[in-house]
Image (cartoon, rainbow, N blue to C red):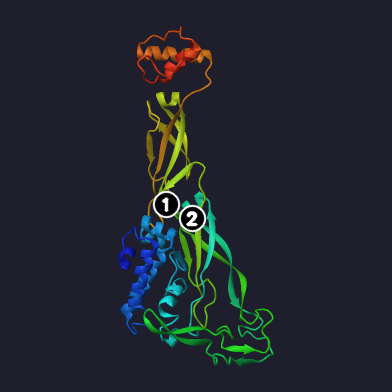
Amino acid sequence: MSKSDYYELLGVERNADEAGLKSAYRKLAMKYHPDRNPDNKDAESKFKEINEAYEILSDPEKRRLYDQFGHAGVNQNAGAGGGFSGFDGFGGGFEDIINEMFGGGFGSSSRGRNSARKGKDIRVDLTLEFEEAAFGKKQNIEFFRTEECDVCHGAGNEPGTASHKCSTCNGTGEVRYSQRSLFGESISVKQCPTCKGKGETFDQACRQCKGHGIIKKKHNRDIDIPAGVFHGANMQLRGEGDLGQNGGPRGDVIVVLRVKAHKQFTRDGNDIYFDLGISYTQAVLGAEVMVPTLDGKAKFTIPEGTASGKQFKLKGKGVPVLNGYGRGDQYVRIIVEIPTGLNRKQKESLIAFDQELTGKKPASASVPEDNKTNKDKKGNDKNFFDKLKDTLS
């Protein structure tokens, strides 16, 4: 089933600015927030959709990719356990806006600080060579994520010492405040400042995790980068991020791909472009040359009388289609190199050739060197051979 257009979901024009996006999102979030629509699956589904739309369009890089490639640019599945996507769900990225509207909660204790919460996402930047992005590769990545403390096993207190129910929050891990806002009276639910949301205090905090119950550890993960990825694509590894809270799932790892520029090729979508410099003689007479491609060198025939700037297509020599079939093409642009530093004999040969070709005699040699100009008597630009004649003169 095709996904809805993000701009249509938020009800904004494609050129909407940041303020316009935020205003549209706030109105829709108020309308479809689950706390205002309990047990309404349609409202919950709509709320997820508008959060996804805002998450993409509020990020300049993701918005650029969406505008250029559509949903394929920001949400490409790439095999089990990973894919190209934005951040999943509607949690941390929008918490500030939701808290601003609802004062940290909307009277629902089930969504409070002690409810199960997904862990934080982790960003990993990965740089690829041009060819690696074109053909894909296996890659091992390293990152630090939270793990359960192996001394206290998540309890937070030093083994053998006692823990007590927090007297400030009575073990709930949160405190509540009643306040008035633009939308009327609301209940503000905040983390308990005494126990930091744990609901417990300790006689002695764990020496390793300082009472948090979690520590940061290095983690390794092998990933398969598919052929055809582009600069700025995001690869999402679900469930590989930080530990969740209160039994919630782990966050995700977002691998942001950066592709190095190539010394010879430039890329546009799945097509690549290459400038081939040839001599004047090869352009006039034609030639058989070797052209570099992503697959190695390929034999290419330059037709007789090829002009500088002429472009030829090598079908199927471009970048493989991401998660699809086939490849783009390679375009070869001809650049005719004008000879310089000719000796007298070479210049005379060129002048003789020009005279035979045009039927015109060489220009007069009586013009002094200092009076030479790049214009002829009629004020037109002199051609290459006229300039050579002036040099001989």
Residue at the disc numbered 2:
136
Amino acid type, mark 1: Pro
Q: Quadrant of residue 148?
A: bottom right
Q: Locate the N terminus and report the quarter of the image it occupies.
A: bottom left
Q: Quadrant of residue 151?
A: bottom right
Instruction: Decide: is 158 above or below 129.
Output: below
Q: Is residue 112 visible?
A: no
The residue nearer to you, when weighing 331 against 95, is: 95
Q: Is residue 92 visible?
A: yes
Expressed as whole percent of the image width and height from the top left, the position of residue 388 reads 46, 16
The residue nearer to you, when weighing 161 against 151, is: 161
> Disc 2 vs disc 1: Cβ atoms closer than 8 Å?
yes
Instruction: Decide: is 139 above or below 147.
Output: above
Expressed as whole percent of the image width and height from the top left, the position of residue 75 reads 40, 63
Residue 320 - label: 1
Instruction: Decide: is 136 above or below 81.
Output: above
* Residue at image point 34% right, 68% down: 24
Expressed as whole percent of the image width and height from the top left, the position of residue 364 reads 43, 8
- Label 1 neighbour load within 10 Å: few <14, some 14-19, many 20+: many
Task: Estimate the spatial distance between the alpha carbons at disc 2 and disc 1, rounded to whole Å.
Answer: 9 Å
Numbered disc total: 2
The residue nearer to you, when weighing 23 against 223, is: 23
Amino acid type, mark 2: Gly
Quick one: SS at disc 1? Answer: loop
- Label 2 neighbour load within 10 Å: few <14, some 14-19, many 20+: some
The disc, 2 or 1, on the residue closer to the chain's N-terminal end is 2
Q: Quadrant of residue 46?
A: bottom left
Expressed as whole percent of the image width and height from the top left, the position of residue 116 reads 48, 82
Quick one: SS at disc 2? Answer: loop
